[in-house]
Image (cartoon, helix red, strand yellow):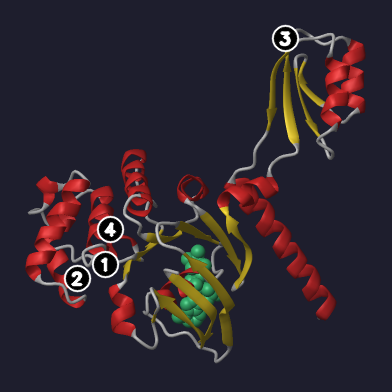
Amino acid sequence: MLLEVDGLVKRYKTKDRKVVEAVKGIGFSLEAGRILAFLGPNGAGKTTTIKMIAGLINPDEGDVTVNGYSVSGKPKEALREIGAVLEGSRNLYWRLTPLENFEYWAGIRGVSRKVARERGRELMSELGLENKLGSTVQQLSRGMQQQVAICAALIHTPSLLLLDEPTLGLDLDASDRIQEYVLKLAHERGVGIVLTTHQMEIAQALADYVSIIQSGTLTLEGLKSEVLERYAGRSYLFELGAVASVEVRRKVEARGGVWSSKVEFRVVLDDPTDIYDLMRVLEPTAIVKMVRETADLAMIFREHTRMASASEEALRGVTS
Ligand SMILES: Nc1ncnc2c1ncn2[C@@H]1O[C@H](COP(=O)(O)OP(=O)(O)OP(=O)(O)O)[C@@H](O)[C@H]1O
């Protein structure tokens, strides 16, 4: 397994000497070539977890292993496997050129300057930025800076890439370019990617797996396709070829249908086989469209976090 996160706990001491348990014993794993969207509301513990994976802060309990190397036990070997873009392009020196930045990062990761230059050129031309190698980072657009930051994180050919909000604040074009590249890195090159974002459409587009963390605990995990299926709408949209008669409309309403126009209605079917009964009701009229409305991650995230915080509130009410 590429990444194994086991029983991570992180407690912070605040200025008024209180202890905040930001991460409360979470565990998950990720295989090579897959993208995990690590989602959660503000303050849920995402950054703390990512920083523990990247070896930037030490967990109070638990451990992270990357390709079998423990981040606490074998930090040099483990960190050689990890690339991270954690705070946008802030991992770059703005007064230096991309190439100079690559040399700097390569030095930290034990890669020679020569290899860094070669690999840097290769990565930049993959992103269509080969003519920007000599500009200073501050002369580049925000989208380009973000792409250079990703190149810098890849300079030592890591097998795991940690990306925190990689497309935040970028225009559609720059965002698309980064998304395409992330997909290529994972699915063609076999890099494992942990991606944190509040942009659900990005998670929806890129993720193979989804995890939601809330108040330091994982509250939902799974393959994106399974998560979507689990929440898939039981809601169906029908469009008819002609205005339905009053009788048909009443019968549809009696089965829970809600008309949005004289030819279109939605109905939620608790039992999917109820659809046959509905079809019989609609028989006099042509059906031009029948769609089972699917769930998307934005809807699931909203629903799930709302439900989980409501039950947490309820529990607190019981125990206090
Ligand atoms: N250095 C610190 N000292 C004390 N508390 C901290 C520190 N860093 C984070 N916290 C607290 O730990 C909890 C988790 O924070 P974290 O930054 O990991 O959340 P997050 O999910 O990344 O949030 P966001 O989406 O807002 O970036 C929060 O309650 C936060 O206030």
Residue 97 visible, this orientation: no
The secondary element bearing badge 1 is classed as helix
The residue tagged with tag 2: helix, strand or loop? helix
Q: Earlier in the sequence, mark 4 or mark 3?
A: 4
Query: Percent from the top left, x then y, of residue 271?
Result: 84, 38
Pointer 1 residue: 91
Q: Earlier in the sequence, mark 2 or mark 4?
A: 2
The answer to which quarter of the image holds residue 146 is bottom left
Q: Which residue is identified by label 4? A: 150
Mark 3 or mark 1: which comes first in sequence?
1
Q: Is residue 151 above or below residue 48?
A: above
Label 2: how many Cα within 10 Å (few below 14, some 14–19, many 20+): many
Q: Amino acid at mark 1?
A: Asn
Residue 7, percent from left and from top: 56, 81
Residue ID for mark 3: 241
Check disc 2 and report the residue beneath it: 105
Q: Earlier in the sequence, mark 1 or mark 4?
A: 1
Whether label 2 lies within 8 Å of ligand 1 gets the answer no
Mark 3 to mark 1 CA distance (whole Å): 58 Å
Q: Nearer the viewer, mark 3 or mark 1?
A: 3
Distance Cα–Cα, label 2 vs label 1: 9 Å
Q: Is residue 52 left or right of residue 104?
A: right
Say if mark 2 contacts mark 1, CB within 8 Å.
Answer: yes
Q: What amino acid is labelled 4 in the image?
A: Ile
